[in-house]
């Protein structure tokens, strides 16, 4: 019995060591990151200077790459705090707009991609990652379903503010989120974000039917 116990304990210890080792390996080295960046840059060799400027990571992106999107709690909290400090709200104080326009923003997948003409439409491509209005049956599942977002959560001032802020800078609430920082990185305009907020919260919006 004792031997079996001892073996079981040893096996557990080995498993734990394995976990610890795997964890230690999960942070990438500077050399690995430099090699990855070189490959990415080579892929955009004939891109315009405006495009290649986007290959330079900001501090949040660099930290996320370093920890393969899973930073330790302390680093995560620091990153979220710094991203929270970037939030900018409309001077008018109005955080919602027109849900019909917001639906177009959510559906529009073009803008800022390598093959997109500069000056063309720029959208949020929300359906690439989220379920929203039920009539749209092609959606990605990387993000949670937002179907009935307003119907389920209500329409409080705090929720409107959170929704605007989350879309403005997703990493203020979830460091290393896969969701683009639409306002912070200038992908969507203030008006577009307000319209998308309305699309998620307005009781008339197809999202909430
Ligand atoms: C590339 C994928 C991706 C795209 C594009 C994307 N999101 Fe997200 N979104 C996520 C992921 C992943 C989460 C969950 C993790 C997190 O909270 O950041 C999320 C979370 C959210 C949340 C928070 C949900 C909650 O329960 O609090 C909202 C609101 C949201 N997204 C709205 C949008 C809107 C609006 C758009 C389009 C303008 C959009 N997202 C585009 C990936 C994406």
Image (cartoon, rainbow, N blue to C red):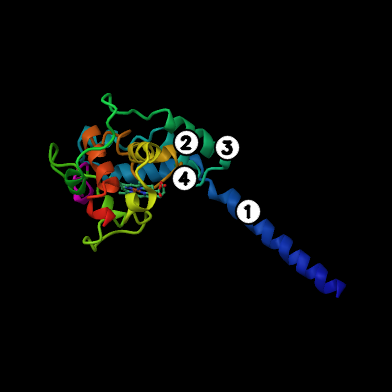
Q: Secondary structure at mark 3?
A: helix
Q: CA distance from mark 1 to mark 3?
A: 20 Å
* Closer to viewer: mark 4 or mark 3: 3
Marker disc for residue 21: 1
Counting residues from the start of the chain, the first of labels 2 and 1 encountered is 1
Mark 4 residue's CB less than 8 Å from ligand 1: no
In the rendered image, which residue does mark 4 sit on?
Answer: 32
Distance from disc 4 to disc 3, alpha carbons, whole Å, reads 23 Å
Q: Secondary structure at mark 4?
A: helix
To which quarter of the image does residue 18 belong?
bottom right
Residue position for label 2: 80
Q: Mark 3 — residue?
A: 74
Q: Residues within 10 Å of mark 4 (few under 14, many from 20)?
A: few
**Total marks placed:** 4
Q: Position of residue 29 (x, y in %)?
A: 51, 43
Q: Are marks 1 and 4 in contact (CB under 8 Å)?
A: no
Residue 156 in magenta stretch: no
């Amino acid at each position: 019995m004792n031997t079996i116990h001892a073996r079981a304990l040893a096996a557990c210890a080995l498993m734990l060591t394995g976990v610890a080792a795997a964890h230690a390996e999960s942070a990438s080295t500077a050399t690995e990151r430099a090699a990855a960046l070189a490959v990415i840059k080579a892929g955009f060799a004939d891109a315009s200077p405006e495009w290649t400027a986007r290959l330079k990571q900001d501090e949040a992106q660099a930290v996320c790459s370093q920890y393969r999107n899973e930073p330790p709690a302390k680093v995560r909290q620091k990153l979220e705090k710094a991203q929270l400090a970037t939030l900018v709200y409309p001077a008018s104080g109005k955080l919602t707009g027109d849900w019909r326009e917001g639906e177009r923003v959510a559906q529009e997948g073009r803008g800022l991609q390598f093959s997109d003409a500069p000056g063309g439409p720029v959208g949020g491509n929300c359906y690439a990652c989220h379920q929203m209005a039920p009539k749209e049956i092609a959606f990605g599942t990387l993000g949670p379903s937002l179907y009935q977002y307003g119907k389920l959560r209500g329409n409080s001032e705090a929720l409107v503010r959170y929704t605007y802020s989350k879309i403005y800078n997703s990493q203020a609430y979830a460091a290393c989120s896969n969701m683009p920082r639409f306002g912070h990185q200038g992908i969507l305009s203030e008006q577009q974000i307000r319209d998308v907020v309305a699309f998620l919260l307005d009781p008339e919006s197809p999202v909430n039917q």
